[in-house]
Image (cartoon, rainbow, N blue to C red):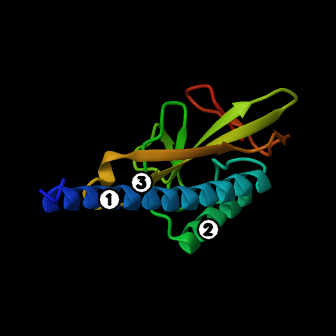
Amino acid sequence: MREGIGGTALFNIVIFFVILFTGYICISINYSKAFNVKNELVNIIKNQAGVCVGDSGICYNFKLQIQDYFNDVTYHSKGTCDDGWVGYNRNGDLLGSGASNAAFCVKGIRSTDNSVYYQVQLFYQLDLPIIRSMFNLSVSGETPLIYNPYECIVDSYGYPWC
């Protein structure tokens, strides 16, 4: 009775900790990448003085910046927007409220003095092949106040999009 734990039990414990460590590393890397993409989306919205919903030249620039950025980072996670959030795809095209299969979601919140700030939500996943679809996680942030946004409409839920 020299061995208190059998070889199989010890092997199972080692495998468990390797999977646990690998999962932690995967989620840390994906969270970091999602956080950086979210920060750039917030910067694009801030620099464009809002989220575009029309076909004006400013909106074309917004869409072009979104397309260029997503092509550069090759970020492919998608998710479903909650009610009151509007989804966009990787090309910067508006998908609508509560969109599924959206690259990111945006929610505009009207503040005082004709100003708006936007909340941005981006999705990331645990990239382990078997349990990839079990966890759909998100990271969110918000822009600073944007004073006098260039164009404003109110959607069917009463949220401003400027």
For disc 2, the neighbor class at 10 Å (few under 14, some 14 to 19, many from 20) is some
Does the residue at mark 3 contact the one at mark 1 (Cβ under 8 Å)?
no
162 vs 104, nearest the viewer: 104
Q: In the rendered image, which quarter is residue 13 located in? A: bottom left
14 lies above or below 113: below
For disc 3, the neighbor class at 10 Å (few under 14, some 14 to 19, many from 20) is many
Q: What element carries label 1?
A: helix
Instruction: Judge left or right: residue 143 versus residue 106.
Output: right
What residue do we see at 50% from left, 65% from top?
75
Residue topped by disc 2 = 69
Instruction: Judge left or right: residue 160 versus residue 157.
Output: right
Q: What residue type is labelled 1?
A: Ile
Q: Label 2, label 1: how many angstroms apart (C-alpha)? A: 33 Å
Q: Which amino acid does label 2 sit on?
A: Tyr
For disc 1, the neighbor class at 10 Å (few under 14, some 14 to 19, many from 20) is few
Residue topped by disc 1 = 19
Q: Is mark 2 on a helix, strand or loop?
A: helix
What residue do we see at 32% from left, 55% from top?
132
Farthest residue toward the bottom? 72
73 lies above or below 42: below
Q: Which amino acid does label 3 sit on?
A: Gln
